[in-house]
Image (cartoon, rainbow, N blue to C red):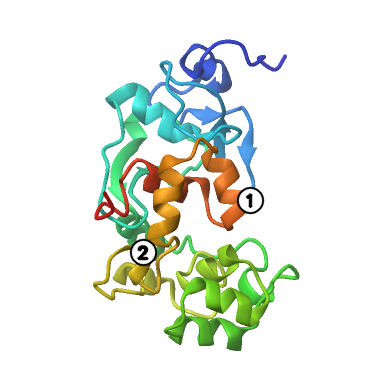
Amino acid sequence: MRATRVGEIQDRFWSRVDKSDPSGCWNWTGTVNMTGGGYGVIGGLLYGKRLAPKGRRLLAHRVSWIMANGDIPESDEYHGSVILHTCDNPLCVNPAHLVLGTQKANVHDMLQKKRNVPVRPVGTKSKRAKLTDEQVAEIRASDLGTVALAEKYGVGRHTIQRARYGRSYAEGEEASTLLAGPRVRTGLKGGSNPAAKLTDELVREIRSSSLSAAKWAEKLGISAEAVGMARRRKTYKHIP
């Protein structure tokens, strides 16, 4: 019978894991995110802390690494620190099969092992696509800011950001381009950077507001993580 959600993550985590092979993969038997690479996910508090926005779940293999090694260290890389599988099994949560790495290393490993084959139509080939190949190319070459581009193409700011920085519409280009890092490097800080998600004024408003990160994210068309990073001064550090 499926384990109920009672107690914190550490109290119920291992009841959702098959450890029948002590030295092999320990496969996650709980909920799986089929649209995000087939990784296990679990929600709730871990050791009294909420490590994901309310309503969002944590990746099970990251939880396993944290329980075995402590907090995942911060990284200056665009995607932050990631936890890699040495076994290439997304369901595995055996701490012995998990290593700390970067997204750059993850992409390099993916290319070496040819794991970058999409399992469903992506980008402009998807029926849900809002932009054409030509529009995506124009957006990536444009010097306009996110808001101006969103108005020009009649889409949300989040859609523009995902197209501009390769989080969507990635078919039609070599995955190895991800190894070069973010596409836009202007040297300008905060709202002066055309790639910025928030203006300096918005950052100040967010920091002084009691509105939740999730509500701000919905209002502005960006991720709750981006709001949280700005609020905690992990980004936009130049703003007092």
Choose between 145 and 122: the one closer to the eye. Answer: 145
Q: Quadrant of residue 153?
A: bottom right
Residue at 54% across, 56% down:
222
Label 1: how many Cα within 10 Å (few below 14, some 14–19, many 20+): few
Image mark for residue 35: 1
Residue at 55% across, 67% down:
168
Picture coordinates of residue 163, whole percent (x, y):
53, 72
Label 2: how many Cα within 10 Å (few below 14, some 14–19, many 20+): few
Q: Is residue 36 visible?
A: no
Marked residue nearer the N-terminal end (1 or 2): 1
Q: Is residue 205 visible?
A: yes
134 up-or-down from 127: above or below: below
Picture coordinates of residue 70, whole percent (x, y):
29, 25
Q: Which residue is mark 2?
A: 112
Q: Quadrant of residue 159?
A: bottom right
Q: Which amino acid type corresponds to the residue marked 2 in the rendered image?
A: Gln
Q: Secondary structure at mark 2?
A: helix
50 up-or-down from 3: above or below: below
Q: Which amino acid type corresponds to the residue marked 1 in the rendered image?
A: Thr
